[in-house]
Amino acid sequence: MKTLVVDHPLVAHKLTALRDVRTDSPTFRRLADELVTLLAYEATRDVRVTEATVETPVAPAHGVRLARPAPLVVPILRAGLGMLDGMTRLLPTAEVGFLGMIRDEGTLKAQTYATRLPEDLSGRQCFVLDPMLATGGTLAAAIELLFARGAEDVTAICLLAAPEGVAYLEQVFTDSSNPVRVVTAGLDERLNELGYIVPGLGDAGDRLYGVV
Ligand SMILES: O=P(O)(O)OC[C@H]1O[C@H](OP(=O)(O)OP(=O)(O)O)[C@H](O)[C@@H]1O
Ligand SMILES: O=c1cc[nH]c(=O)[nH]1
Ligand SMILES: [Mg+2]
């Protein structure tokens, strides 16, 4: 598994504002949206393309188009929904599937409460959106589900990751024929005793949509 921490001053600036406890929900949503578009640029570096030729007003020009089948973008509800618009802005022809998952805050185990994905993902490139990679349980379960349906490779886009979560994914995904990549704006210090990323940004879902 490969992990890319995007090193860019605009990403660092927006991430700092996102972390700030004084940042309100509307601003948090805007920053998350902007950050995802910046991360998506790196995350789609290996998106599959096919050669294409178009006629300019002057002459034929050789270029590329996104290959078929279209990539599948999968936000993990709730918090991943705050990353969807920023992603599809850069990849408007992608299809979108949905996974609803919640981490039990006692056991820290992920449970899936909603699945709306194509049954057959053979040959598909998938991009999973979830702002927080903490223990890694949620992302691991989501990625396993996509591979079980035939996905070819999976790139997870996160706003923040913990070393513990990255290590867990490295341990789970060792098959080089089904590569996994994590692209994140920041790799933080550690998890605390409640399974929260330190220094992190708190509960991403609550900060986007309110406490439930
Ligand atoms: O890496 P893990 O330890 O599994 O934790 C990360 C998960 O926790 C958060 O979701 P949460 O369960 O709070 O659901 P929500 O998006 O509805 O708030 C977050 O958005 C991830 O999905
Ligand atoms: O720090 C964390 C860990 C899990 N989920 C969050 O939203 N934040
Ligand atoms: Mg939450």
Image (cartoon, rainbow, N blue to C red):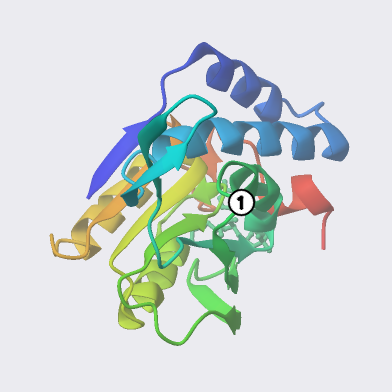
Instruction: In the rendered view, tell whether residue 126 sits above or below residue 181.
Output: below
Q: Position of residue 17 (x, y in %)?
A: 70, 22
Residue depicted at 54% across the width and 28% down the height: 57
The answer to whether residue 124 is left or right of residue 89 is: left
Q: Secondary structure at mark 1?
A: loop
For residue 154, say whether it is visible.
yes
Quadrant in the picture for residue 32:
top right
Q: Position of residue 65 (x, y in %)?
A: 42, 48
Instruction: In the rendered view, tell whether residue 180 sits above or below residue 62.
Output: below
Residue depicted at 57% across the width and 71% down the height: 97
Q: Which residue reaches farthest top?
A: 9
Q: Position of residue 187 (x, y in %)?
A: 41, 32
The answer to whether residue 93 is left or right of residue 170 is: right
Residue depicted at 60% across the width and 70% down the height: 102
Instruction: In the rendered view, tell whether residue 138 sits above or below residue 196.
Output: below
Query: Mark 1 highlights which residue?
Result: 92
Quadrant in the picture for residue 153:
bottom left
- Kind of residue indicated by mark 1: Pro
The answer to whether residue 116 is left or right of residue 135 is: right
For residue 162, say whether it is visible.
no
